[in-house]
Amino acid sequence: MKKVQISLILYGQSLFLINLQPMRILHTSDWHLGQHFMGKSREPEHQAFIRWLLATVNENSVDAILIAGDIFDTGTPPSYARTLYNRFIVDLQKTCCQQLIIVGGNHDSVSTLNESKDLLACLNTHVVGGVTENPQDQIVVLKNHQGEPGAVVCAIPFIRPRDVLESQAGDSDTDKQQALQNAIAGHYQTVFKLACDKNLPTIATGHLTTVGGQMTESVRDIYIGTLSAFPASAFPPADYIALGHLHRAQKVSDQAHIRYSGSPIPLSFDETSARKQVVLVDLEPNAAPTITELEVPTFRPLKSLKGSLETLQQALAQINDDSSLTTWLELEVSTDDYLTDLQKPIQTMLEDRNLEVLRVRRKREINRAALQSESKETLDELDVAEVFTRRLNDEDLDEQRTATLRQAFDEILASLDEPDDDNKTAEPESKKELMV
């Protein structure tokens, strides 16, 4: 329930009671609508999350929602992902919350998000797909329940280097990193100064990696070869900074007002142990924000199990599989048997269970025998980074040459993942699987 402030104001001989309610913002990010997880659609989970979110908005009297990037998983989202997106915006207008701000992330296509922004503006939705030429376009004033201005948002999306920086010939990697950091910080300061003119509580958004941020395997580097992470000290002094990109919910540099909401559903098996959440932020003038974490229910369980066939059978027997959605499993088996010989016993363990194995791995031992055994693996078990690493390890190269090749490979992989706003043809499935 919202905190209510009562102010007594005397005009002449009359005493007025004014009910001043703080602005309540809900911060979320990294929905990745349209994600294919090892060939599986996440549509049922996203549908369940959106239903939960709409109910949560009413239960908590939310004034506005901020989505801090990566609303979609690819620059050319499938039709059902677009339908989920549009239907959510329409259904939000039926709740107590009729203000929505969406900023683009590194997975989003600027043109895809911006193509409908004028239409969505009629539904109280402000979309900032990418950095705009006029910084004023990234300023959004939010209204409270009384219809008065209650907060101002610096709606800053994922900043691509080309948006704020011109490359200089001859710059070292250190020079490029510092130049990009300064350019991003400068953009924040420019937009923040415009927001300060409103004399309202301020919120800034962002979609980037910060220094000390905890990564998961479903998060990729954004600024390959240049800026690895953005320092918290370079953010402007906003009352709250709503970040996206890292899928694990966390505070930045132990500062409660700078935080990632995290993704609402686990996007990789190493996220299954982390609690998923959205963040409620109460803002009022001349006071620190009140921040409340709301746990998101688990709509589809994901489990990662390790051990011998015997211990795995025991672990599987203990899993509660009465969820409405099938539990997805990742198994790492410690055995001398070839992987092809493991399929039958594993399938036997899963009979009449609401369980499905998406990935089976063998325990990797760092010795020659293990390397020989790994030759029995299929490419389906490995991602492209693992294939490249193993091929690189076969070569007799010095450390500098190895590091150069790794960086070049990462840059190529990142360029494949980045949405191409000039080419909106459908992407092949092989490329989709590279995007995490």
Image (cartoon, rainbow, N blue to C red):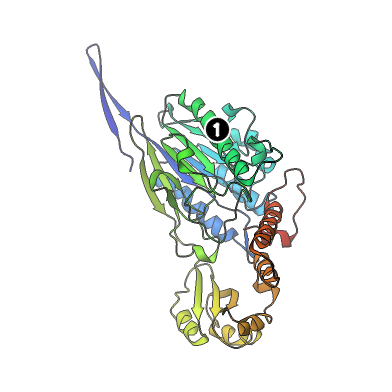
Q: Amino acid under label 1?
A: Gly
The picture quadrant where one finds residue 35 is: bottom right
In the picture, measured across the screen, residue 209 lies left or right of residue 239, that is right
The relative height of residue 392 versus residue 421 in the rendered view (above or below) is: below
**Residue marked by disc 1:** 186
Residue at the image point whose x is 47% and y is 72% from the top: 322
Residue at 38% across / 45% down in the picture? 256
Among all residues in the image, which is located at the extreme left?
A: 13
* Closer to us: 315 or 207: 207
Q: Quadrant location of residue 190?
A: top right
Q: Is residue 55 visible?
A: yes
Instruction: Name the image quarter holding the N terminus.
Output: top left
Where is residue 303? Give x, y as percent: 50, 71
Viewer-nearest residue: 57 or 288: 288
Q: Nearer the viewer, residue 141 or 212?
A: 212
In the figure, 435 relative to 209: above or below? below
Please say whether residue 97 is visible from this viewpoint.
no
